[in-house]
Image: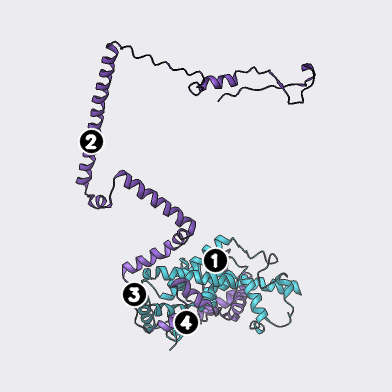
Chain colours: A purple, B cyan
Amino acid sequence: MPEHIQNGMQCHEFEALLSDVLDRVLSGVELDRFQAHAQSCAMCGPLLTEAEAGRTWLKGLTEVEPPASLVGSILASTTGVDSQRLRATAHAPQPRISRLEHAQAWLSGSLEPILATIRQPRFAMSFGMAFFALSVGLTVAGVKPSDVRQISLRPAAIRRTYYATQAKVVRYYENARIVYELQSRLREFRRMVPAEPGPATQKDHKNDTTQQPEQREERNYSRSDHDYLLARAPLGPNRDDLPVVSVSTYRRFV
Amino acid sequence: MTPATVLPRTVFPGAQVEDVQVVAMLVRRCIAGDSAAWEEIVQTYNRRIYNICYRFAGSRDDAEDLTQEVFIKMYRTLSAYDSSKGAFVTWVTTITRNLLVDHFRKSKQDRMTDSIDTASSEHEDVLPLSEQIQDTSAPPDSHVRSREVSERVHAALGKLSPELREAVILRDLQDMDYREIATVLRVPEGTVKSRINRGRAELARLLQRTYKQVM
């Protein structure tokens, strides 16, 4: 607002006193100066009128009634208990809830969706099968529940178990190496000793084709790719009358 | 004794010392886990908070949602209230105002004073404000209590800028004193007075312009 001095009062001073005038706390000489400025200043006069009118409009607004369900909704969203229940229990002795119960309530609330999913039959079946497979696997591996119970989880015990397991693995590897060396030596000795001629046990396998399956297969697949196959047809007087069909067969590589 | 009668309305601006102590005790009980004390707080302040939200947001649905949010926030931060730093009602109003400002920023409903004939609120239906006023013969103060005029004033209030709107709501509708408003808005008292004056003048100008257009 540009500064104007009217009747010894500046416009910013007028604005500062405007609230007091509307609140009717200004009186005496100050009020006279204020009113004189309002009558003479082309900007502050209308401002006083408008502010007064606006205040009257606003003061005319009445309070609105909140919805009847509002309190209940608030209580339900904050304490989780509706109003009627609260009223009924307002004078009843409130049981002291321990932290453990709080934690249990929180856990049950947060785990409920997961448990609801798990309780479905298909998940129960899957978990049952998984448990069965695990138990069978552990039994085969020689793990017993009593062993698990005896496992110590102290850092020193875990460290000792680690080193013991490592020593077992190293020992096993060393033993296996010795065995392999012995085996290779034995093989060398056998090669050095001349082989004795064995009894001639030649059997007549003329009709035994089971000993040569590869050859049978080779015979089956050694046919030329462009052999002529004779279609089944009634035999005629001449061989030349038979219909001839050309078939291309492709060799399969398995 | 119903919870609503536990706290007299004098806990609001101009509260007596004993009332402030009553509120402080109620807050302490509530922090200790007394759900009945919390219900008393809700019963006492829900009307006030709802009205602030309604006048600021302009819609009953928004006001209901915002009031709930205010109480949820209050419930979570009740232990942060320090009675030595100010009245409980000031603290509550500060929470309400902060939440309203957040809501305003989110919804981006910046209705400036100049946009008088633009989009309408739920009270204006489809017609602009100028087309809804029918009786212009009598002075404003003779009609201000009528429901229709109240709704028009409410609609005009919604067209003020948020800074002016919150200042006039707290002063003229909630009867808070300048010091409390300055605390809530975190601005000097002089700024509060200036905003209130400008807000009132803007509102009157809006309504007068409407009348002129009808005439």
Is A160 displayed left or right of A3 in the figure? left
Q: Are marks 3 and 4 in contact (CB under 8 Å)?
A: no
Q: Residue furthest bottom?
A: B1
The kind of residue tagged 4 is Gln
Q: Are marks 2 and 4 in contact (CB under 8 Å)?
A: no
Q: Mark 3 and mark 1, same subunit?
A: yes
Which residue has dot 2 on it? Answer: A168
Classify mark 2: helix, strand or loop.
helix
| Distance between mark 4 and mark 1 Cα atoms | 39 Å
In x, y percent, where is residue A144? Answer: 28, 50
Which residue has dot 3 on it? Answer: B32
Q: Is residue A185 above or below residue B44?
A: above
| Distance between mark 2 and mark 4 Cα atoms | 71 Å
Give the residue drawn at x 50%, y 71%: B68
Label 3 vs label 1, nearer the camera: 3
Return the mark for residue A84: 4
Q: Is residue A235 above or below residue B19?
A: above
| Distance between mark 3 and mark 4 Cα atoms | 21 Å
Q: Mark 2 and mark 1, same subunit?
A: no
Is A123 displayed left or right of B159 in the figure? left
Is residue A6 visible to us here?
Answer: no
Which residue has dot 1 on it? Answer: B163
The kind of residue tagged 2 is Lys
Classify mark 4: helix, strand or loop.
helix
Q: Is residue A183 above or below residue A139?
A: above
In x, y percent, where is residue B160? Answer: 60, 67
Q: Specify the subunit that label 2 lies on.
A: A
Give the residue drawn at x 59%, y 71%: B61
